């Protein structure tokens, strides 16, 4: 019998990630304590345009609760910078996700969705800094993972640029349910062959994954 995914448990133990912007860490979402904060971010017009979770807090709760009550293959987290919650992240097993039906997935491919909450955190390079830090940590903590992937909406140029500046390469465009996505890939081989990736860039806004993620 195969071992069930335990990604949610892994993420909780990854610890602090030093960055040029401060100390970054992921903390698993706690419901109902974090619900009002998350729902407020989801109702920001820039975020809502891509995440599509604007409206009552129940919409956000259903989205997050489905992951918390799942089998551990997707970990919804708050991103804390110097102890202050300022972003929302989903780290998930892309190879076990419906996304795997749209690209040539490899075992242990790990996917990332994110949003930067407060508007004053966007557009100044912070997204790229945090994406790069998390990709480094995923590849360090998950030795069986050779690639970190993301699939932002192609219309979300700020997000695509942030992934590029965090060392991801555009691999393909995918027609997913509800959006056309840019498949962005950070290869472990990139680190062996060419050292650290590009520096910080503008912050991203949304994810997008093909199942009722609604999510990336």
Image (spheres, grey):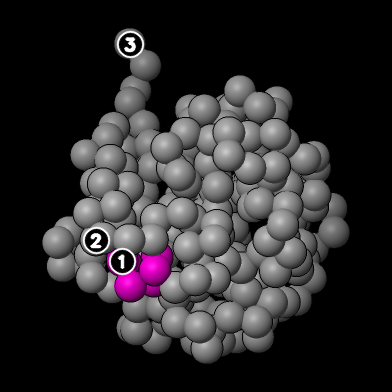
The image shows residue 117 at horizontal and vertical percentages of: 44, 75
Say which residue appears at 70% left-offset and 69% top-offset: 158
Q: CA distance from mark 1 to mark 3?
A: 39 Å
Q: Is residue 189 above or below residue 130?
A: above
Residue 95 in view (yes/no): no
Q: CA distance from mark 3 to mark 2?
A: 39 Å
Say which residue appears at 54% left-offset and 35% top-offset: 210
Give the residues drawn in magenta, as a range: 38-43
Q: Is residue 52 rendered magenta in the image?
A: no
Task: State which tag comes first along the sequence, 1 or 3.
Answer: 3
Task: Describe residue 140's horizontal placement relative to residue 214 as left or right.
Answer: right
Q: CA distance from mark 1 to mark 2?
A: 5 Å
The image shows residue 134 at horizontal and vertical percentages of: 54, 62
SS class of the residue under badge 1? helix
Say which residue appears at 44% left-offset and 60% top-offset: 89
Q: Are marks 1 and 2 in contact (CB under 8 Å)?
A: yes
Task: Describe residue 41's horizontal placement relative to residue 194 as left or right.
Answer: left
Q: Which residue is mark 3?
A: 1
Say which residue appears at 40% left-offset and 65% top-offset: 42
Q: Which residue is mark 2?
A: 57
Q: Which residue is mark 1?
A: 39
Task: State which tag comes first along the sequence, 1 or 2.
Answer: 1
SS class of the residue under badge 2? helix
């Amino acid at each position: 019998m195969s071992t069930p995914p335990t990604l949610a448990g892994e993420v909780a133990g990854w610890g602090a990630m030093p960055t040029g912007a401060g100390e970054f860490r992921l903390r698993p979402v706690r419901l109902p304590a974090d619900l009002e904060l998350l729902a407020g971010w989801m109702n920001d017009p820039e975020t809502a345009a891509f995440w599509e979770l604007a409206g009552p807090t129940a919409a956000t709760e259903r989205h997050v609760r489905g992951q918390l009550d799942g089998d551990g293959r997707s970990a919804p987290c708050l991103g804390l910078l110097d102890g202050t919650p300022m972003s929302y992240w989903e780290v998930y097993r892309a190879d076990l996700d419906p996304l795997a039906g749209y690209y040539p997935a490899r075992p242990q491919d790990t996917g990332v969705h994110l949003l930067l909450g407060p508007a004053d955190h966007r557009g100044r390079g912070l997204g790229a800094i945090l994406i790069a830090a998390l990709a480094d940590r995923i590849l360090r903590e998950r030795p069986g993972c050779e690639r970190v992937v993301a699939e932002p909406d192609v219309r979300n140029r700020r997000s695509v640029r942030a992934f590029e500046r965090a060392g991801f390469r555009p691999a393909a465009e995918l027609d997913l349910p509800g959006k056309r996505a840019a498949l962005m890939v950070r290869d472990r081989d990139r680190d062996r062959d060419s050292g650290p990736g590009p520096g910080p860039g503008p912050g991203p806004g949304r994810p997008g994954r093909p199942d009722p993620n609604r999510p990336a």
